[in-house]
Image (cartoon, rainbow, N blue to C red):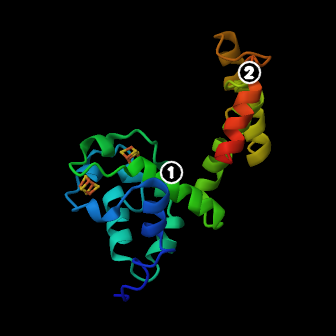
């Protein structure tokens, strides 16, 4: 087992997490309720409570493993874990922070890259129109992932069902939206 090396340093993940989100990993007493209720726990390499334990221990390699984990990208932000936690540990907020760190440190799990591209394309769609523009989202996602033919046959059906609008609908005050994007650095 590695030595406890960096969990208390000011630039450690737990310290940065607390500084930027207010989430204190020390509040978790490992009851496991979050992981038991998480609908995606079986798809995760590390369950939410396991991530918290790794952050608490801060052993060599733990931070790297967390930032490279697939768990960050399958989390739906459904907040079930937060609702069940007796200690009110805001795990969705923690996951958001860890995803951002994973991106900025270039440690995104290979299986999470397409999901990240989907997030980026969705944000772009909302940035330019103020709403979700499905056709633009699909086209942008396919261009980013080069999965050109995946699910292509669904498009005509969705169009006939009225689920796809060919042209985007723009909101009126897009300037205020731009300011939100600038402020959040999205
Ligand atoms: S439910 Fe809360 S206290 Fe229990 S393991 Fe999860 S985060 Fe920790
Ligand atoms: S927010 Fe994420 S970690 Fe929490 S229960 Fe939902 S999918 Fe699981």
**Percent coordinates x, y for residue 118 in the rendering:** 65, 42
Q: Is residue 67 above or below residue 86?
A: below
Of 122 and 23, which appears nearest the observer?
23
Residue 96 numbered tag: 1
Indicate which quadrant contains ligand 1. bottom left
Q: Does 150 appear above or below 55?
A: above
Which quadrant holds the C terminus? top right
Residue neighbourhood size for the residue with mark 2, other residues' Cα within 10 Å, grouped as few (<14), some (14–19), many (≥20)? few
Identify the residue shown where x is 31% and y is 52%: 89
| Residue 179 seen | yes
Spot occupied by residue 84 in the image (x, y as percentages of width and height): 25, 43
The secondary element bearing badge 1 is classed as helix
Residue at (29%, 65%) from the top-left corner? Answer: 26
Q: Residue at x 26, y 60 (%)?
A: 28
Residue 114 position within the rendered picture, expressed as x and y whole percent measured from the top left: 65, 49
Contact, mark 2 vs mark 1 (Cβ under 8 Å): no
Which residue was labeled with disc 2?
A: 173
Image height check: is 176 above or below 80? above
Label 1 crowd bin: few (<14), some (14–19), many (20+), radius 10 Å? some
For residue 109, say whether it is visible: no
Q: Is residue 58 left or right of residue 185?
A: left
Q: CA distance from mark 2 to mark 1?
A: 27 Å
User: In terms of sequence position, does the residue under pointer 2 or pointer 1 come before the other?
Assistant: 1
Q: Nearer the viewer, residue 33 or 183?
A: 183
């Amino acid at each position: 087992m590695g030595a406890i090396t960096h969990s208390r340093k000011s630039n450690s993940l737990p310290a940065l997490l607390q500084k930027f989100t207010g989430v204190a990993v020390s509040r978790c007493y490992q009851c496991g309720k979050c992981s038991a209720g998480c609908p995606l726990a079986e798809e995760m390499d590390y369950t939410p409570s396991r991530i918290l334990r790794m952050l608490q221990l801060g052993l060599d390699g733990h931070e790297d493993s967390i930032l490279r984990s697939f768990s960050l990208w399958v989390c739906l932000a459904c907040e079930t874990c937060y609702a069940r936690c007796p200690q009110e540990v805001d795990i969705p907020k923690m996951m958001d922070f860890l995803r951002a760190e994973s991106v900025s440190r270039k440690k995104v799990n290979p299986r999470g890259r397409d999901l990240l591209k989907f997030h980026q394309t969705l944000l772009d769609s909302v940035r330019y129109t103020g709403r979700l523009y499905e056709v633009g989202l699909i086209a942008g996602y396919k261009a980013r992932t080069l999965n050109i033919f995946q699910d292509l046959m669904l498009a005509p059906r969705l169009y006939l069902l009225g689920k796809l609008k060919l042209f985007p609908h723009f909101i009126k005050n897009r300037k205020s939206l731009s300011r939100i994007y600038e402020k959040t650095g999205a």
